[in-house]
Amino acid sequence: IKPPYAQSLPPILNALYFPVILLLLVAIPQILLYAKSGIVQRYILPGIFGYAFLIITLYNYLNKTYKFAAKLILLLIMITLSFNLSLAWDAAHTFGLEGKSTNALLRTIEAKTQVNDPILIVANPHLSYEWSTSIKKYVNYVSKRTNLYFHSYVSPQNIFLKKIEILYKYQTLGKITNKKDFQCIILFPYQKEIFLRSSSSWFLKDKFEEYEFGNFNRNLNKNTKIYLYCKKQRAEKI
């Protein structure tokens, strides 16, 4: 005779003791680290692994004694996941669009610059920290463009800015002798307006071609753009 559910509760809790501890160990650090910035995309993975282990353990235990309850739980999980498939598909599609825009941006930089041309990157290091680091590494090691400068309009005491300045070896806007020498200028999301206002004394927009690349902030605004300004090519003399 199968025991009543109330009597079988302690064995269930005992079986779930380790999975629950594992879930807490992987989920709590993620919550503490990313509570303000948002727990999305790859930051969800540790918690998902812990949650999946918990569900599998619960299902295996119930399937030995209460097969109907186990099948019911499995059905409910499948129904819940089906509701989120459209959200997952939309996120994956947006991620793919960002990848295409990234490739187009990098290809354009390579096409419009020579190896030693100075390139300026303008970004908010807090909002675009990963992009600011990854684009430098790619342009340096893959595109072989090493003459990079970084500029930001945040406080000089910003901790993210200090890290970026170290990465760029303190090659900042103030270090270049003639700002008009920049061959290309990359404006990360939310930097275009403030850059155009602040650089009007040396940046002559009509001397540059403007390129617009969308889908660069899937976390907040799918339509956020990166702008690239490269000097217009001089017409060859006949």
Image (cartoon, rainbow, N blue to C red):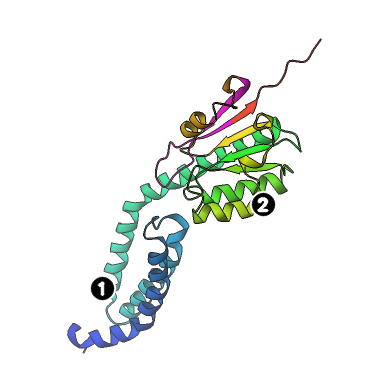
Q: Residue at x 42, y 61 (%)?
A: 44
- Measuring from the top left, give residue 6's x and y in whole percent: 18, 85
| Quadrant of res 58 | bottom left
**45 vs 223: above or below:** below
Q: Residue at x 37, y 79 (%)?
A: 21
Crowding around mark 1 (Cα neighbors within 10 Å: few <14, some 14 to 19, many 20+) is: few
**Quadrant (top left/top right/bottom left/bottom right) for the C terminus:** top right
**141 vs 209: above or below:** below
Can residue 164 be seen here? The reply is yes
Q: Farthest residue in the top direction?
A: 238
Crowding around mark 2 (Cα neighbors within 10 Å: few <14, some 14 to 19, many 20+) is: few
- Residue topped by disc 2: 169
Q: Nearer the viewer, residue 97 or 214?
A: 214
Q: For residue 224: magenta?
A: yes
Across the whole image, how many numbered discs are drawn on residues?
2
- Measuring from the top left, give residue 81's x and y in whole percent: 34, 57
Q: Nearer the viewer, residue 72 or 30?
A: 30
Q: Residue at x 38, y 73 (%)?
A: 23
Residue extent of the magenta highlight: 207-228
Image marks 2 and 1: residues in contact by CB distance under 8 Å: no
